[in-house]
Image (cartoon, rainbow, N blue to C red):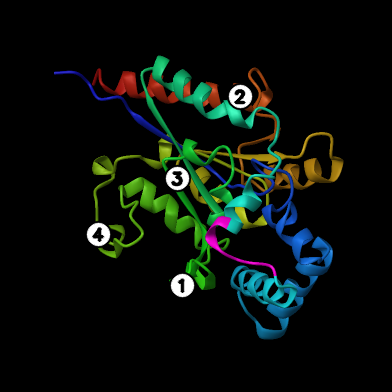
Amino acid sequence: MPVSRPKIAIIYDFDGTLAPGNMQEYQFLPEIGIPAEDFWSEVNSLAEDHQGDSILIYMHLMLKKASAAGVPVRRNDFKHHGESMQLFDGVEEWFDRITEYGRCMGTSVDHYLVSSGNEEIIAGSPIRSKFKRIYASKFIFNENDVAEWPALAINYTTKTQYLFRINKGAEDLSDDEKINTFIKKQDRPIPFENMIFIGDGTTDVPCFRMVKDLGGISIAVYKPQTPHARANATKYLEDGRVHCVAPANYADESQLDKIVKARISEIAARESLARLF
């Protein structure tokens, strides 16, 4: 009977991790005629005034501002915005290369996205098909496929829920029973020890720490050749929230590439050794 390959999950944030900046800034905000700084400043002000969730507020403000500017917010409009997003170097080739490396090491690597950004915009990006699951904030659409209201808002604390969904195999968001069912550690499809979390900012801190504390590896990436971004990432390392930091360069033989491959090799060796006992 063939031995099943150990499963590895690589989990990514999106904005600032796979792509520079925020996804709304590439086309959506320019179309409605609002500078990015003004939009996010208003989001922060409203969040403070109403003691609200900044993710829900930015989604509400997107619809409100688009309506005032006469800019359509159909599903395909958002998808079109995603087509203009810039990605960090090497991102488009990264997923297939790392998956193949994992296969050669005797493992099965799946990629997951957990983002506070818009799922509908991500749907237009060239890497959409590379993820086994995408967990991102999204809208409710009416019968004319026009966005009406936030359906799901993923903030810095709720991000951790999706790590448990991956861990337990409760990946269907409509399944509230399995995510809350007790499952023995050895029966969970992807142990935390086999998780790699890659993020860049404050919304990733709870995930950084959870994966690190439960035996996985957390990596903070930063925009290459940007001193303040590197300083922010280094602070996560100094505070014990991540194992390491690296430039957000996904090219073959980059520092990030070497770190992730080394971790995959380590997991493969650990799993191989465990089979001998």
Nearer-N-terminus badge (2/1): 1
Q: Is residue 272 above or below residue 231?
A: above
Q: Is residue 254 above or below residue 67?
A: above
Per the rendering, the mark at residue 77 is none
Query: Which quadrant: the N terminus?
Result: top left
What secondary structure predominates along the stretch shown in magenta? loop
Element carrying mark 1:
loop
Q: CA distance from mark 4 to mark 3?
A: 19 Å
* Residue 90 seen in the figure: yes
Element carrying mark 3:
loop
Nearer-N-terminus badge (3/2): 3
* Residue 116 seen in the figure: no
Left or right: where 38 falls relative to 50: right
Q: CA distance from mark 1 to mark 4?
A: 33 Å
Per the rendering, the mark at residue 214 is 3
The residue carrying mark 2 is 257
- Of residues 146 and 232, the one drawn nearer to the viewer in this rendering: 146
Q: Amino acid at mark 2?
A: Asp
Asked whether disc 4 touches disc 3, contact meaning CB atoms under 8 Å apart, the reply is no
Name the quadrant containing residue 19.
top right
Q: Estimate the x, y position of residue 169 in percent, counting from the top left.
A: 31, 47
Q: What's drawn in magenta, residue-wise?
A: 71-76
Query: Which quadrant: the C terminus?
Result: top left
Q: Estimate the x, y position of residue 62 in percent, counting from the top left.
A: 66, 69
Per the rendering, the mark at residue 142 is 1
Q: Is residue 155 above or below residue 79?
A: below
| Residue that lies at the very extreme toward the bottom in this rendered image | 50
Left or right: where 120 falls relative to 54: left
Element carrying mark 2:
helix
Q: Amino acid at mark 3?
A: Leu
